[in-house]
């Protein structure tokens, strides 16, 4: 009976990973809607927002690089600077 239940629950282990891939995909697709225009300098509030995105990336399957880059672009940070921040 326990072995049967474990076989039923085995696919549930893959759900968080699939969810993480989905979140990464949606965040990368949101770059298409990213506002363009004048870029704004970094400040403490923006850095805290990027840090929270990196914290969300601790979930399996979510790309820390992708979330950091996308979040920085949505905060109107120049893409080159967003790339530098993503590698920190």
Image: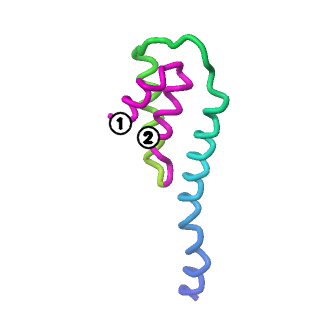
Q: Quadrant of residue 6?
A: bottom right
Residue at image location 42% in from the left, 31% down from the top:
83
- Mark 2: secondary structure: helix
Where residue 56 sits: x, y (%)? Answer: 48, 41
Around disc 1, counting alpha carbons within 10 Å, would you say few (fewer than 14), some (14 to 19), or many (20 or more)? few
Q: Is residue 63 magenta?
A: yes
Q: Which residue occupies the extreme front position in the image?
A: 80
Dominant secondary structure of the residues highlighted in magenta in the image: helix
In the image, which disc is placed on residue 87? 1
- Chain part drawn in magenta: 61-88
25 vs 77, left or right, is right
Where residue 47 sits: x, y (%)? Answer: 41, 23
- Mark 1: secondary structure: loop
Residue to which mark 2 is pinned = 65
In the image, which disc is placed on residue 39? none
Residue at image location 53% in from the left, 21% down from the top:
75
Q: Quadrant of residue 30?
A: top right
Is 48 above or below relative to 11? Answer: above
Q: CA distance from mark 1 to mark 2?
A: 7 Å
Where residue 2 sits: x, y (%)? Answer: 54, 85
Q: Please tell me which residue lies in front, 74 or 32.
A: 32
Q: Quadrant of the C terminus?
A: top left
Residue at image location 63% in from the left, 43% down from the top:
26
Is 18 above or below relative to 62? Answer: below
Where residue 52 sits: x, y (%)? Answer: 45, 32
Is 23 above or below relative to 54? Answer: below
85 vs 23, left or right, is left
The answer to whether the residues at label 1 and label 2 have Cβ atoms under 8 Å apart is yes
N-terminal of the two: label 1 or label 2? 2
Q: Quadrant of the N terminus?
A: bottom right
């Amino acid at each position: 009976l326990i072995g049967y239940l474990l076989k039923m629950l085995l696919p549930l282990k893959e759900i968080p990973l699939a969810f993480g891939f989905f979140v990464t995909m949606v965040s990368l697709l949101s770059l298409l809607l990213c506002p363009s225009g004048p870029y704004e300098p970094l400040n403490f509030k923006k850095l805290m927002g990027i840090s929270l995105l990196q914290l969300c990336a601790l979930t399996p399957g979510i790309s820390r690089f992708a979330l950091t880059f996308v979040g920085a672009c949505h905060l109107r940070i120049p893409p080159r600077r967003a790339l530098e921040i993503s590698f920190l």
